Amino acid sequence: MGGSGSRLSKELLAEYQDLTFLTKQEILLAHKRFCELLPQEHRSVEESLRAQVPFEQILSLPELKANPFKERICRVFSTSPTRDSLSFEDFLDLLSVFSDTATPDIKSHYAFRIFDFDDDGTLNREDLSRLVNCLTGEGEDTRLSVSEMKQLVDNVSSRAREREGRLGLWLKLSLPQILEESDIDRDGTINLSEFQHVISRSPDFASSFKIVL
Amino acid sequence: SSHPLASVSQSARITGVSHRVLPNSPFLAFAGDRSGRRPSSKQAPPGRRGSPPGQQERARGSPRPGSPRRKQTDRRREQRGQERSAAERTCEGKRKRDGRASLREQRAPPKKEKEVLKKEEPWTRPKKPRSSSLASSASGGESLSEEELARILEQVEEKKKLIATMRSKPWPMAKKLAELREAQAFVEEYEGALGKGKGKQLYAYRMLMAKKWVKFKRDFDNFKTQCIPWEMKIKDIESHFGSSVASYFIFLRWMYGVNLVLFGLIFGLVIIPEVLMGMPYGSIPRKTVPRAEQEKAMDFSVLWDFEGYIKYSALFYGYYNNQRTIGWLRYRLPMAYFMVGVSVFGYSLVIVIRSMANNTQGSTSEGDSDNFTFSFKMFTSWDYLIGNSETADSKYAAITTSFKESIVDEQESNKEENVHLTRFLRVLANFLIICCLCGSGYLIYFVVKRSQEFSKKQHVSWYERNEVEIVMSLLGMFCPPLFETIAALENYHPRIGLKWQLGRIFALFLGNLYTFLLALMDDVHLKLSKEEKIKNITHWTLFNYYNSSGWNESVPRPPLHPADVPRGSCWETAVGIEFMRLTVSDMLVTYITILLGDFLRACFVRFMNYCWCWDLEAGFPSYAEFDISGNVLGLIFNQGMIWMGSFYAPGLVGINVLRLLTSMYFQCWAVMSSNVPHERVFKASRSNSFYMGLLLLVLFLSLLPVAYTIMSLPPSFDCGPFSGKYRMYDVLQETIENDFPTFLGKIFAFLANPGLIIPAILLMFLAIYYLNSVSKSLSRANAQLKKKIQALREVEKSHKSVKGRATASDSGDTPKSSSKNATQLQLTKEETTPHSASQSQIPNEKAQGSGTVLPASRHLPVSQPPGVRPGSGHPPSQARPCRSASGKKAQRPP
C-alpha cells in the first residue's frame, strides 16, 4: 500500500468489516495482496475494486498453491459470468469464509460447494470419488521434475494400477460406508443439510478449514 | 389474518386525498404519487398481494452495482432528497404521522391494480417494500398507534439483526453490500421516527451511543488482533507444518500470556512493594548474607546456583520480613504475599477451566464422532492452512495412509492373529516400562538423598551440587525414546500407540516430579526438626552477646552485626531454590537437545549428504520431526513446577516468562530450519482440549503439595513473611482480627464453622447430581429429535416425489437443485417465514394459494430468515436458504 491514496475508503472498509469476518488489518492486507496480483499500472483503488484477476494468478498465491481444491475454491467464489476470475470482493468473500472467526455454518456451506464438483447441489458417488482423488494427490505425478519423471516411468504403470486398485478398493469399501453414515434420507446422495449435519460433528473441521493470508 | 389492516386501508382510501396536498415526506411521496395516478382510487396501494411482483422484481434484479436495481435506488434517492428539502418546511411530527399513515395504508391487498403498479412504479416496492407498503396516507389518526410503532420497532430490530448476521450469509459480496446498504438506510430512516417527545430524543441518543459503541468495539477488536504477538510466525509454521504443530505454538503463546499475568500479579503486589518500601538489604539477619558465605557470595558459580546474594534477595521467600505493615503506605506485605500465592492458583484454575470450556463448546458431541469416521476422513482430513508443497505431499501421503488404514481395519477386523504372542509381547512391554518408571523414580530418590549428604560436606564439586537436576533432565531426555522403542513390541495401532506413549511419558514426568517432592519433603522435615536447636543457639548467642562482661555497662552495646547472627536453614527458600534450579536446568537441557538433536543433525544430514555412502536425507538419520506431544508435556510439567515453586520463589515466574519468550523464538527458528513435517495423527482441535485437560490435572497436582505445606507445616522461625506464626494461614486470621471490624471477624468465624461447610459441600454434590441428570435427559431428547427429523425428512421426500422433482440447476452456481414447489414458495413467501421446519411450508403454501394473507408475508421481502444455525440437527431447515437462492435464479429471465 505504498503510495498515497492506495487505501480503501473508510466507509468501504467499515462495510467490509460488517460483511466479512475479517478485521481491518486483514482487509487491508488482502487488498494489498490482491493489488500485487494486478499489473503495475492498474493498482489504483478504483481499478483494483473493479479488476478481475484470472484464476492462474490467484492460484499462484502461496496460500493456495498447495491446496488440492484450489480450482474448486476459486470457482465457487467467482461471481464473474464465465467463472474464471475473481474480483476483489470475491477474494474478500473467500478469505472471510476461510478466516478464523467465520461460523462453522458458513464454512460447511462453502465446503459443500467446493466438494460438489459438478455443481448439481448434491454429493454423489462421482463427486466423492473425485474428492478422494484430490485428497490422495492426483496431480502429483504431473508436477514432478524431469529426472524424477524418468525414475517414475518404470513403475508408473504399476503405481497407476496400485492407485487404481487402492482407490477402487477404498471407494468400494468406504463409499457405502460414507453414504451409510451421512445420507440421512437414503436417496443415494448427500445433500447440503446432511453434509452440514455430519460436518458439525467433526471436532477439527473448523480449525483446519482455514486460510490465512 | 389481514382483517384489521383491511379496515385500516379502507379508511386510508377515503382520507388519502388530503395527504396528497402535503408532499412533505418521503413516504408520502410514494403515496401521493401513487394515488395521483389513480384518482379513482378505489384501491389501496399494494399490500401483501401486490408485493409479489415487486419481490419478483427484486429477485430478478441482479444485485451487482450498475444493475437496474441500483439505478432504481438512485432514482429513488434523488426523489427522496427533493422531498426532504420540501419536508424541512413542515413540522416533523406531521411528517412522521404521514409517514406512519402511509405505511399503514399499504397493508390492504389491492387485486386489480397489481398490474398497473408493476408497470408504472416498479421502484416503489422493490427496495423497501416494507417502507413503501407502510407508507400511505393517514387513516385519520393523529398520532401513531402503538401497534404500528411496535411493528416498525420490530422491523428496525429485524434489520439490525440482519446487519449483524449479514456476514454469515452465504451470498456473494455484491449482494451483501447491496443488502447492507439497504438495511442501513432503512434503519436510519425509521430509527428517528421511533419514540415520541422527550422519549424520542432519548431514543436517538441511545441509537447514537449504540452506533458509537459498535464502532468502538470494532476498533478495539482491531486493536486487540494487532496486539496478538507472533501471529506471522505461527502462520508461517502453520503453512509449513499444518495445524497440529502450530497448535503447540499457540499453546505456548497462551501459556506465555498466562505467565505474564501471574508475573504482573507477583511483581506488582509482592516484589516491587518489598523492594521499594521494605527494609533494605543488610538491615536484619534474614536480609544479609551470613559471614561464612560472604567471601564467595558474588562469584558467578555461586550465583549460578542461586546461592549467595541471589539467595538473600527478594526473589526468594526467606528475604521477606514479618512486619505487619511496611512503608508509609502501611502496605500489609505478609497478607499480600499470602493472597498473591493463593490468587496465582485461583487465576490459573479459572483461566484453564474457561479455555477448556471454550474448547468443548466448539466440539459439541464427542461420542458422535465414532459414527462418522469415514465421512470425516473424506471431508475434513485436508488441512487448508498448508501452503507448502512438501507439506502438502506429506499430507497426501498421510491421507492415503489413513485411507489404507481404514481399509486394513475393515479387513482385519475379522482376521485372526496370533493372539497369544501379541498378548505376551504387550505384557512384556508394560512390564519393562513399569520397571523403567520404578527405576527412574528410585534413581531420583537416591540422588536427592545423596544431595543432602553432599550439602553437609564442605567442598562440593559442581557435579555433586547439580546432580539432581542433571539426572532428572537426562531421564526426561532418554526415557521417552526408550518407551517408544519398547512400544514397538506391542504392535498397537498408531493412534492407540500414541495414546499409550503419551500416558507413559506423563506417568514418567509425574513420577519424577513427585519423587522429587517426596525427597524434598524429607529434607524439609529434617530441617524442621533441627529448627528448635538452632532457635536456642540463636537465642543464647544474642543473650550472651548483650550480657557478656568486658563491655562497658553504661554504654549500650551496638547490636550484633546481622551477618553474624546464627540462623536456621530456611526450608522455604531451599525449596524455592530447588525449583529455580530445576527450571533453569530444564530450560538448558531443552535448548541443548534442540541444538544437538535437531539443528546439528539437520546440518549433518544436509551437508554430509554430498559425500556419504547412502542417502542421509531419506535413510537413517534423516531430519528430525517436531515432537509435539513431548514438547507439550514438557511445557505442561514446566508450568507445574512454576506453580509449585512460585510460592517459595516469587522470582520464578519472571524466569519462566523469560524462558517462554526465548523458547518461542528459539523453537520457531528450530522448527523452521531443521525439522520436517511429521505424519503422525494428532489432530489440532482435539489435542487442544487434551492439553488443557493435562494442564488442569497438573495444576491440581501441583496445588496439593503447596496446600500441604501451607496448611500443615510450621513456617521457619527466622525467615519469610510468616515467621513467628504457628501456620502460614494465620496471617489471614490476624488481619481479620486486627484490621476488620469485629462483626466481620465473627462472620468469618461463623463461615468457617464445619456445621456450615459440610452442608455446603453436600449442596454442591446435589447440584452436580442434578446437572448430570439434566444433561443426560437432554442428550436423550437430542437422540429422539434426531429420529424425528429423519421421519420428517422421509415425509417430505414422499411429498416431493409426488410433485415431481424439477431440476432448476440451469444456472451455473446453483448449489442445489430445487424442486418446483420450493421455487413457488420463494415467490409467494419471499423467504419471509422463519424456516423452522420444512413441513410447515406446505400448509403455508396452500394457504397463500387460496388467497389469504399470512402474517408472515407482511415482512419485508428483503428480510432474510434469521440465520439458521447449523448442526443443531435440523437438516431440512438448513437447506432452505440455499434452495431459495436457486429458486430465485431459476426465475430469472435469461
Image (spheres, coloured by chain):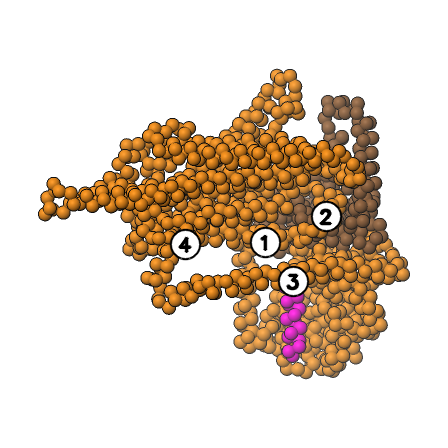
Amino acid type at mark 3:
Val
> Over which residues does the magenta segment extend?
B145-163
Q: Which mark is residue B370?
A: 2
N-terminal-most mark, 1 or 4 = 4
Whole-number angstrom distance, CA of label 3 to CA of label 1: 18 Å
Closer to the camera in the image, B773 or B243: B773
Comparing marks 4 and 3, which lies closer to the viewer?
3
Q: Where residue B530 sits: x, y (%)?
A: 33, 42
N-terminal-most mark, 3 or 1 = 1
Q: Where residue A26 sits: x, y (%)?
A: 59, 47
Residue name at image x 72 percent, y 68 percent: B859
Q: Secondary structure at mark 2?
A: helix
Amino acid type at mark 2:
Asp
Residue name at image x 66 percent, y 68 percent: B155
Residue name at image x 48 percent, y 52 percent: B347
Q: Where residue A119 sits: x, y (%)?
A: 80, 48
Which subunit holds the residue at mark 4?
Answer: B
Q: Which mark is residue B774?
A: 3
Q: Is residue A42 above or below residue B171?
A: above
Q: Is residue B688 above or below residue B438?
A: below
Comparing marks 2 and 1, which lies closer to the viewer?
2
Whole-number angstrom distance, CA of label 4 to CA of label 3: 37 Å
N-terminal-most mark, 2 or 3 = 2
Instruction: Answer yes or no: are tags 3 and 1 on the same subunit.
Output: yes
Residue B152 is a magenta residue: yes
Magenta span dominant secondary structure: helix
Dot 1 alpha-carbon crowd within 10 angstroms: few under 14, some 14 to 19, many 20 or more: few
Q: Are marks 2 and 3 in contact (CB under 8 Å)?
A: no
Whole-number angstrom distance, CA of label 2 to CA of label 3: 24 Å
